[in-house]
Structures are given as C-alpha cells and as structure tokens.
C-alpha cells in the first residue's frame, strides 16, 4: 500500500456489498466528489473485493492503489481499499455539494436560482440539454444551439421578468365577464370587430416570431427560453380573447389587409434574435401599447376595456424584456446600433408601396373613437386617430432614445417604422 492512505479525501462504508450488488451506487457518486487525482477509501467487510475493484478501476481509468486492514472498532474484519480518481469517464465540473437554496417568505423565485447559479459567459454546445450546474459526462454530441453567448442572449433581468410573468397569467375563458358584454349599434360593433380581427392577426405573429428562437437558445440560458414561453402563452391568450370578443357582438371577423400581411412576413423572416427583439418587441409591441391604450380609452363597455387592459399589461412586460435584451446587447456590442438601424431600413424598403395604415383598421379605429356614426362624432374620431399616430411616434422615439439611440436617429427610425404598427 502506498502512502496515499493518509491523503484519502473521502471514505465510504461499503458493508459487505459486492461490486454487482449495489457497491457501485456508493462508489461512483463518492468518486464524483473528488478532483481527478483525489483518493477514495472504501471500507469493506467483503473478502476478495480487491480483485473486483482492481478490474473495475482499470476499465474506468481509475487507479487501484491497494488495501490493508482498517483501523478502528471493526479492524479485525474490515479491509480498507484505496482508489485514485482518474481524469476520464467521470462527468466534468464540480458537484453542487453546498447548494441549498434559501426560500424567502416561503417563496423560491427564478431570480433567487439565477443568483445562486449564474449564467456562463459562453456556453458549450456539447452539454446539450444538461441543466446549468449539472456535471456533464464527456463524449456527448454537439447540439445545434447557436445562441451561445450571454451578452447577446440573456439580460440579467430575465429571471425577475419570468417570475412576474408566471404570477400574472390569467384565463380568457374564466376571467372575462362575458355574460356582461352589452349589445352595441351594429356599425360600432363592426368597427370593434375589425379592430379585434387586426389585433388577433398581429398576435399570431407575436406568437410565431419568438418561437423560432426558443430552440436556438442554449439551455445554459434557459430562463430566456422560459420567459419567451410565457410570452408565447400570453400571445396565445390574446389571440383567443380577441377572437372571442370579435365573435361575441354579432358582427364576426373583419378584413385581413395585404399591408398587415406584408408587414408580419418581414418579422417572421428575421433570423437574428436581437434584431427580432428590437423590431417585434421594442418597436412593434411598443407601438401596440399606445394602440391598446387608445382602444381601452374609447371602449364602449367595461368588458371590452378589461380585455384590452389585461393584454396591455402583458405587452408591457414583453416590451420591457425587448428593451432590456436590446440594451444589454448594445452595451456589449456597439456595432449593433448600425445593424439594428439597417434592419429597420431593410424592412422599410420591403414595405415600400404597401400603403399606409390599413384602411379597414383606420376606419374601425375612427368609428370606435367616435362612438357612433353621426358626422360630428366621426370628425372627433378622425382627430383622435390622427392624435394616436402622433402619440405612437413620440413614444416610439422615446423608447429608441431609451435604448441608446441619439434623438436624431430615434426620429428617423421611428418614422421608418411599419404603418401596420407591428
Ligand atoms: Fe399580445
Ligand atoms: Fe406581446
């Protein structure tokens, strides 16, 4: 026996377990607690275990150091075997031995988990779906994740926003007072139904666009995929509730315009995650906050106002995530400003000739704001619609400045934004 005995970092009591009868379930986890080169002592009552251990160590590329009688109470019957952990065949990284998440007021948030298990700067594509912090056995396949850099993918606020999103889920089936929806004048109802048709179409794009990025995000940044899954659940609910509203007043769905269709295709075709977050969430969903506020302010009944208010609360979170994502990425890569500007310009070029705000939507919003089809009311509705466009432009400019663009750039980019709003 070598002098390794005195340096054994971990010892296990193996009783009389044989190699093929459970001993490995004690042996393998104990070896994982050691650094490569560390020594494990196995105290065993079993005769002849040295042969089995020595063969197993050879196969597993560990080193069997030898054995001698143990000291202590059972010294007469116990044998102490010493094994040195090899470099291979054992998962990489350290076991989370001291990991004990502490709840606060009985709660355990994703934000607490993130601070206990920080995201790595870069992620290894061969760790596959291994959760962050797991020990990864070498030899696994490469996965096709290509969003593998924290600075481009994962703003630190993401876990807090995920916690908020989970807590804020609501139900379009149960939580809306559908039985209290009043009847409206058919012209006003048709206007409302057109507006909700437009909203639902845009919500469909807001569901599909992020879904394309989820499967590309490395699981080391799982909170980003988890947040996007809540965003997608929100959008599914918005589609559901808006279509239900459009079909609850006697009018049914309205028109889907070619302008909207062209605009949403340019979103769906984006392949860069940050460009998509910028165009969809900062500019598109940001503009929708003003649109939803307008509809809420002019809603002819409380049920309709409640639907839009709930959606706006969700959208506020989506815009917030888009903003922190883009700001975080810009802070680490200043060349991104130019890329984002180019993305807006490319989209404006693709939209050239598509016209202004879709006619059916413009008419619907005008009648909604008018509240009736009497000419003086329609004149007021028309003015309100023009004010909405100005308000959208002002707020979009502010959001762009907040992201770090100069006020001149912000003006230009806001003016180039799609007439479809999203
Ligand atoms: Fe939405
Ligand atoms: Fe959204």
Image (tube, helix red, strand yellow):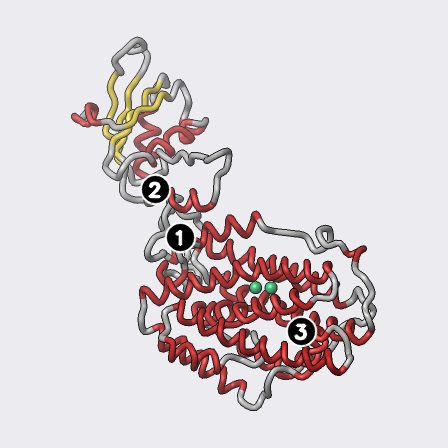
Numbered badge on residue 268? none
Residue that extends furthest to the bottom in the rendered view of this protein: 353
Question: How dense is the environment of label 1, judged by Cα within 10 Å: few (below 14), some, or many (20 and up)?
Answer: many
Q: Quadrant of the C terminus?
A: bottom right
Q: Which residue is mark 1?
A: 127
Is 173 drawn above or below residue 389 in the view shown? above
Disc 3 versus disc 2: distance between alpha carbons? 56 Å
Q: Residue at x 82, y 72 (%)?
A: 185
Q: Quadrant of residue 325?
A: bottom left
Is residue 355 visible in the rendered structure shown here? yes
Q: Secondary structure at mark 1?
A: helix
Q: Secondary structure at mark 2?
A: loop
Q: Are marks 1 and 2 in contact (CB under 8 Å)?
A: no
Q: Residue at x 42, y 36 (%)?
A: 101
Question: How dense is the environment of label 2, judged by Cα within 10 Å: few (below 14), some, or many (20 and up)?
Answer: many
Disc 1 versus disc 3: distance between alpha carbons? 43 Å
Q: Are marks 3 and 2 in contact (CB under 8 Å)?
A: no
Is 32 drawn above or below residue 382 in the view shown? above
Numbered badge on residue 90? 2
Q: Which residue is mark 3?
A: 198
Q: Is mark 1 within 8 Å of ligand 2?
A: no
Q: Is residue 114 left or right of residue 359?
A: left
Q: Residue at x 32, y 56 (%)?
A: 121
* Position of residue 326 measured from the top left corner of the image (x, y, whole percent): 41, 66
- In terms of sequence position, does the residue under pointer 1 or pointer 2 come before the other? 2
Q: Is mark 3 within 8 Å of ligand 1?
A: no
The label nearer to you, 3 versus 2, is 3
Disc 1 versus disc 2: distance between alpha carbons? 14 Å
Considering depth in this image, is 363 or 37 the residue closer to the camera?
A: 363
Considering depth in this image, is 105 or 133 the residue closer to the camera?
A: 105
- In terms of sequence position, does the residue under pointer 1 or pointer 3 come before the other? 1
Can you tell me which quadrant of the image ligand 2 is in? bottom right
């Amino acid at each position: 026996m070598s002098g390794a005995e005195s340096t054994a970092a971990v010892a296990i009591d193996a009783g009389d377990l044989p190699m093929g009868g459970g001993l490995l379930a004690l042996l393998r986890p104990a070896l994982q607690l050691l650094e490569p080169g560390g020594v494990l002592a196995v105290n065993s009552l079993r005769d002849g275990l040295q042969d089995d251990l020595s063969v197993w160590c050879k196969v597993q590329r560990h080193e069997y150091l030898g054995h001698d009688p143990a000291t202590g109470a059972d010294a007469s019957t116990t044998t102490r075997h010493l094994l040195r952990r090899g470099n291979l065949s054992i998962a990489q990284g350290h076991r989370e031995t001291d990991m004990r998440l502490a709840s606060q007021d009985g709660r355990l948030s994703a934000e607490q988990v993130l601070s206990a298990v920080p995201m790595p700067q870069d992620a290894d594509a061969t760790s596959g779906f291994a959760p962050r912090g797991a020990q990864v056995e070498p030899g696994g396949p490469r996965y096709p994740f290509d969003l593998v850099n924290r600075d481009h993918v994962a703003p630190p606020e993401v876990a807090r926003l995920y916690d908020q999103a989970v807590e804020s889920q609501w139900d379009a089936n149960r939580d809306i007072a559908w039985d209290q929806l009043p009847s409206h004048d058919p012209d006003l109802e048709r206007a409302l139904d057109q507006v909700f048709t437009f909203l639902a179409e845009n919500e469909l794009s807001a569901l599909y666009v992020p879904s394309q990025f989820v499967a590309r995000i490395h699981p080391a940044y799982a909170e980003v995929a988890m947040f996007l899954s809540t965003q997608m659940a929100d959008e599914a609910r918005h589609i559901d509730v808006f279509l239900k509203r459009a079909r609850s007043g006697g009018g049914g769905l309205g028109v889907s315009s070619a302008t909207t269709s062209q605009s949403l295709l340019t979103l769906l075709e984006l392949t860069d995650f940050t460009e998509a977050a910028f165009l969809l969430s900062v500019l598109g969903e940001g503009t929708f906050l003003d649109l939803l506020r307008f509809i809420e302010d002019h809603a002819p009944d409380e049920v309709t106002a409640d639907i839009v208010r709930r959606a706006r609360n969700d959208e506020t979170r989506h815009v917030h995530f888009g903003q922190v994502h883009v700001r975080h990425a810009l802070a680490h890569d200043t060349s991104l400003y130019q890329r984002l500007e180019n993305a807006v310009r490319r989209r404006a070029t693709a939209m050239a000739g598509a016209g202004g705000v879709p006619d059916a939507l413009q008419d619907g919003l005008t009648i909604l704001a008018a509240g009736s089809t009497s000419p003086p009311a329609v004149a007021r509705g028309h003015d309100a619609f023009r004010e909405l466009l100005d308000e959208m432009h002002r707020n979009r400019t502010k959001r762009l400045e907040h992201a770090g663009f100069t006020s001149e750039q912000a003006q230009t980019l806001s003016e180039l934004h799609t007439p479809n709003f999203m």
